Amino acid sequence: MFNRNRETGVSYGVIACASLDDWIYDEIDQMDCPGEQEAYAEFMRERAVELRGTGELTFNDLDCPDGEEDLALAELSDQDVCDLIDSVDPDASQAFWDGIELGVHRRFGTIDGVRVSVAELGGALNLWVEDGPHMGWYRPCSPCIPGAGDLDSPAPLNDEGECEEPAVLCYDVPLEWRKKGG
């Protein structure tokens, strides 16, 4: 089943970041973003090929015999390519970082003992709660996130504390993470 902790079998909870207190964004900025450095190096390699095509990057820049620029470029480490492009096109690095969107690069981390990931879905930033001490019954998410509970939609309970409609037991955020009045 998708969107479920494989070790515990408990479903992930998903909440719109807009429903969370503002300090959560500072925590998200500190999270790891696997693949971000690799994507940056690939972007810079592509920029090097573009600059070679326009003549802005020459064999003098690559310190190799004329005609062997492509081979020399392929043999450079990612860091050397990034340093080289920064020296020839200082705006390339900023263009990459300006273009990064969380929807492309999912972030992972642990906040206050709660394991989460963050990504954009449908134009909105969402937080997946993948493990932690808090759980609750929530309505199922839309088909976009099968198996997960929608932390913005608690399941209604009857007088006996039982769910009266389809509900998912899922990981939840601590109450203090939620916006006050939300």
Image (cartoon, rainbow, N blue to C red):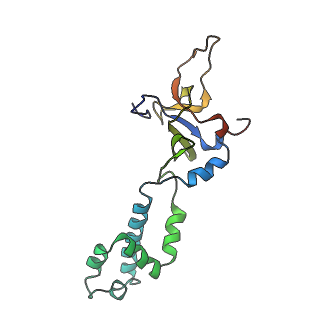
Q: What is the residue that sits farthest to the right in this orientation?
A: 181
Residue 121, can we see it?
Answer: no
Q: At 39% across and 32% down in the image, what residue appears?
A: 7
Q: Is residue 113 above or below residue 51?
A: above
Q: Residue furthest top?
A: 160
Residue 93 percent location from the top left of the image: 49, 71
Q: Is residue 170 visible?
A: yes
Q: Residue at x 44, y 59 (%)?
A: 36
**Residue at the image position 69 percent from the left and 40 percent from the top:** 179
The residue drawn where x is 51% and y is 59% is 100
Residue 54 in the image: above or below residue 162 = below
Q: If the image is split into quadrants, where does the N terminus sit?
A: top left
Instruction: Name the quadrant of the C terminus.
Output: top right
Picture coordinates of residue 134 (x, y %)? 56, 31
Q: Is residue 6 left or right of residue 153?
A: left
Q: Nearer the viewer, residue 174 or 87?
A: 174
- Left or right side of 58 for 167: right
- In the image, 114 versus 22, the foreground residue is 114
Percent across and percent down for residue 118 are: 52, 46
* Residue 44: quadrant of the picture: bottom left
Quadrant of the image occupied by residue 46: bottom left
